[in-house]
Image: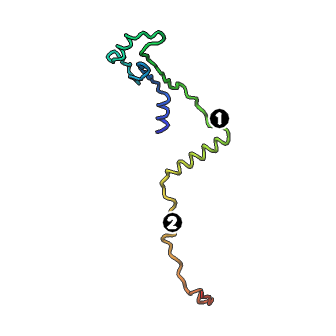
Amino acid sequence: MSLAILILVSTSSFTIEKHFCEGFLINFSLFNNLEKCDDIPCADKCQNENIADADCCSDVIDVVEGQDVFPAKDFDDLDYNQQVFLFAFTVSFNELFNFTSVSKTRYKNYSSPFLITNKLVDHQTFLI
């Protein structure tokens, strides 16, 4: 699931538009078109001031482009150490969430053989 989300985010592209007035961020937009500051008092100030070098208001557009092509790696392209690590990681990760019982005890219903004589008494070995 997390790999699918990672691929979705890395392949999607989006545009961030920012509108600055007098060096301050006034408005930004992630997917839609940006609204200009016509109704903000900054727009009136910009018309009255004469700035020769730059405008009072400016727009900055950042485009984040996603990847189009993913290089497909084959298991044989990896070197031996990477293959061993990948195999050990997948086996241990699968065993982490494996909730099967360990094993069944086969001797639970075992009945001991019938004793004809007591061996300890016959051989006279007693624990003191």
SS state under label 2: loop
Residue in front for this viewpoint, 80 or 26:
26
Query: In x, y percent, where is residue 58?
Result: 43, 16
Q: Amino acid at mark 1?
A: Asp
Residue receiving disc 1: 77
Image point (50%, 52%), residue name:
98
Residue in front for this viewpoint, 43 or 17:
43
- Give me the C-alpha separation between circle 1 and circle 2: 45 Å
Image point (62%, 37%), residue name:
75
61 relative to 91 in the view: left or right? left
Residue receiving disc 2: 105
Name above or below for residue 107 compared with residue 37.
below
Q: How is the image coloured?
A: rainbow
Q: Can you name the residue that lies furthest to the left here?
A: 39
Q: Quadrant of residue 115?
A: bottom right
Image point (64%, 44%), residue name:
84
**Classed neighbour count for the residue bearing mark 1: other residues with Cα under 10 Å, few (<14), some (14–19), many (≥20):** few
